[in-house]
Amino acid sequence: MTSYELREFEWLPDLDLATVEPLVASIDRDGLCVVPGCGTSCVSATLRDGWGFRRVLSLDSDAAAIDFMRARQRDDARRCDFVVADATDCADVVADGAAALVVDKSTLDCLLCGDAAAYACSVARMLAVGGWFLVMSFHDAEFLKAALCAALPFRAEREVVRETNVALLLRRTAGAWEPEAVAAALLRPTVPPERLARLRASWGGARPLREAYDLLFSDALKAEYAFADFEADAGSADRWSLDDALAFLRRTQ
């Protein structure tokens, strides 16, 4: 039984969905739209009521979150479907090639330290060839494109980039994939060359953990990953060299 009070919660709270909608303007509103890891976000309702998608299927492994979302729309005749399901393994809920659009608002972000490869393969499986994958993330667009298009049949089409977040639209192409190759692509360190150059230029000698935290993470990441959590993950060292920081990024990717 859930011991906390559920409420609407948004990852990427500073992401304005109105700025993302133009990315999907040309997508057929009658196809199945799947929202994996929906939580208690307003995204599902926005897809239906704001963006006009007629078939919205939202998945989450947390039964309490699904009950909460079902209750919120109890008196609404135009309901979204909310189903308890693991987005990394949901073939019994979403058949192969059944989805025209998959919408991810920080689900991939949450899984990058865990089952990201299984999740990405699941998305590719459920999408029809020619279908669309909309990813909203606090990671940079170049990392997302490299990670998702390297080993999976996705092609980057359009994007909206803001200071603290990105929305990226990928097209599902024909082709197969190997789960091991997907895992390798997603576990590649998320330190693009330009970011590494900035860190080398600004790091200097060993830095106190607070300074290391400020150099490593953007404001958007700090909103999701507090210093106290970073401090707990960092271990016993109270000062970090750049090599320590890069090792941490690789380990926690």
Image: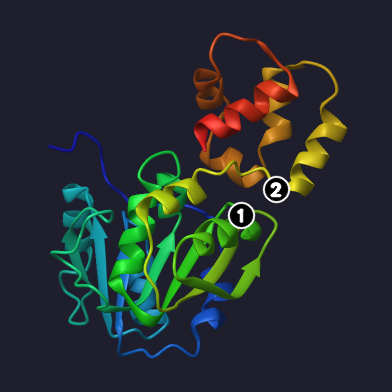
Label 2 belongs to which residue? Answer: 192
Rendered-image quadrant of the N terminus: top left
Q: Check disc 2 and give the amino acid type.
A: Pro
- The circle on residue 143 is 1
Image spot of residue 13 (x, y percent): 52, 55
The answer to which image quadrant residue 173 occupies is bottom left
Q: Label 1 neighbourhood size at 10 Å, few (<14), some (14-19), many (20+)?
A: some
Which of these two is toward me, 136 or 41?
Answer: 136
User: Is residue 8 visible in this depiction of the protein?
Assistant: no
User: Is residue 165 visible in this depiction of the protein?
Assistant: yes
Q: Are marks 1 and 2 in contact (CB under 8 Å)?
A: yes
Image spot of residue 147 (x, y percent): 54, 56
Image spot of residue 15 (x, y percent): 56, 61
Distance CA(mark 1)–CA(mark 2): 7 Å
- Residue 53 is left or right of residue 59, and the answer is right
Q: Check disc 1 and give the amino acid type.
A: Phe
| 180 is higher (above) or lower (below) than 26 | above
- Give the mark, 1 or 2, whose residue is nearer the N terminus: 1
Say which residue appears at 30% left-offset and 61% top-offset: 122
Say which residue appears at 58% left-offset and 27% top-offset: 248
- Residue 36 is left or right of residue 130, and the answer is left
